[in-house]
Amino acid sequence: LTNAYQRSYATGLHEGWNRLYFGKDQWTAAGTPDWASIIRLQVRVNSSGGGAPTAYFDSLYHSYYAAPKVIVCFDDSLASQYTKAYPIMRALNIKGTIYNITNRIGSSATYFSLAEMQTMYDDGWDMNNHTHNHQNLDTDLTTVAAKYAELKTAEDWLINNGFTRNDCHRHVAYPFGGYDDDTLTAMAQLNPLTGRSTKSRTQAHEIDNQNLLAWEGIGNTESLAEAKGFIDRTISEGGAVELTFHDIIDGVAGTST
């Protein structure tokens, strides 16, 4: 193409409808295009796994923008989230969201205690469901009943311990991003508000599938510039992003699981 803007979207899609945002500054210029002179849009779909892909296009909107939102999240109920992340965010008056492995809370020094969890919750942090035992809902559990039990046990734990503000007990993150059709069936029986995958992209405000929300994981390989880039992109596109962290370690590369 000559004198055109190009934008590829290689990751972050799921089966079914996907609503995608494309902010102007997310496009790459080929030649010397001008937005005022653009008269045509070309869309091409390539298969990453071989074979012929099937895609449907419903609608296209332009000049749309909503207030961008950034949610700072943590997974796994790790002690460093209380000892390191919480004081920094409290000083900046930023509230966080933790997806909790309910069977590990207070189980060892690796995880924060119930009292520490309560302190963060009382300060405005939400405490969500990351299952009871952190089992992969795609590969570790093989029946709808087992997947449902893993999710429901964690939800009941959160309810019984009073972590229900904003219905936070009804928001789920799948361990390792693993899910399958049976997982979504179990989720329907649980009747949650959202389920978070590890699809990496800006989340549209008009949610295409409430049980397959996107995220941006911040691990030991992402730089500060890359993390800021996720936020800048979200602002440009007028969407939302869940920036998700795991262990917080001073001065050395951490791990992301």
Image (cartoon, helix red, strand yellow):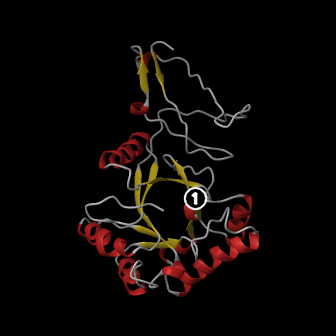
Tell me: residue 27, above or below residue 140.
Answer: above
Left or right of 103 on screen, residue 235: left
Q: Position of residue 104 (x, y in %)?
A: 50, 80
State the image quarter where residue 187 is shown.
Answer: bottom right
Q: Position of residue 211 (x, y in %)?
A: 62, 59
For mark 1, does the 10 Å Cα neighbourhood hold few (<14), some (14 to 19), or many (20 or more) residues? some
**Residue 247's image quarter?**
bottom left
In this rendering, the answer to whether 200 lies above or below 190 is: above
Q: Is residue 123 left or right of residue 195?
A: left
What residue is shown with label 1?
177
Q: Circle 1 sits in a helix, a strand or a loop, which is it?
A: helix
Whether residue 186 is situated above or below residue 159 in the rendered picture: above
Q: Amino acid at mark 1?
A: Gly
Residue at the extreme front: 252
Residue 160: quadrant of the picture: bottom right
The residue nearer to you, when weighing 201 against 223, is 223
Residue 236 at x, y percent in the picture: 39, 40
Total label count?
1
